[in-house]
């Protein structure tokens, strides 16, 4: 099966097809250049909202890594140009 959509919808359409377990190939049609910035931002927001918990957990992990690494680096020697 081939799913045809606007070129900025390809990612979300492919995700949905995989989620529905469709054996499909997704292809996109051209979109007017002036419309692309708004459309791509809207698609990005839709994917972020669709996977909000994965995004929240990823952001929390990225914020927590430096905080968790700080105790490990406290006892390291610091040679600042000595």
Image (cartoon, helix red, strand yellow):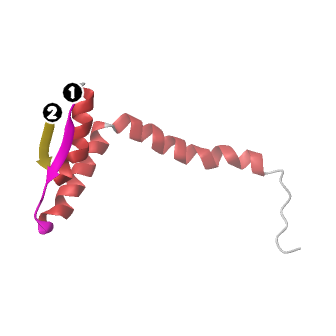
Does 24 appear in magenta?
A: yes
Residue at 24 percent of width and 56 percent of height: 41
Say which of 75 and 19 sits in front. Answer: 19
Q: Do tag 2 and tag 1 residues touch (Cβ < 8 Å)? A: yes
Name the residue tied to disc 1.
22
Q: Which residues are drawn in magenta? A: 23-34
Q: Please state which of residues 8 and 49 is positioned toward the viewer in this rendering.
A: 8
Residue under the image location 79 percent in, 51 percent down: 74
Q: Is disc 1 surrounded by few (<14), some (14 to 19) or many (20+) residues within 10 Å?
A: few
41 in relation to 56, above or below: below
Q: Residue furthest right?
A: 82
Q: Residue furthest top?
A: 21
- Residue shown at 14%/67% (left/top)? 33
Among the 4 quarters of the image, the one containing residue 47: top left
Q: Look at mark 2 in the image and give the residue it sits on.
A: 1
Tell me residue 61's x, y (percent).
Answer: 53, 41
């Amino acid at each position: 099966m081939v799913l045809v959509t606007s070129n900025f919808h390809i990612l979300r359409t492919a995700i949905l097809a995989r989620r529905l377990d469709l054996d499909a190939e997704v292809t996109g049609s051209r979109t007017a250049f002036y419309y692309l910035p708004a459309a791509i931002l809207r698609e990005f927001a839709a994917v972020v909202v669709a996977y909000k918990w994965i995004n929240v957990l990823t952001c929390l992990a990225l914020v927590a890594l430096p905080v968790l690494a700080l105790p490990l680096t406290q006892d390291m020697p610091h040679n600042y140009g000595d």
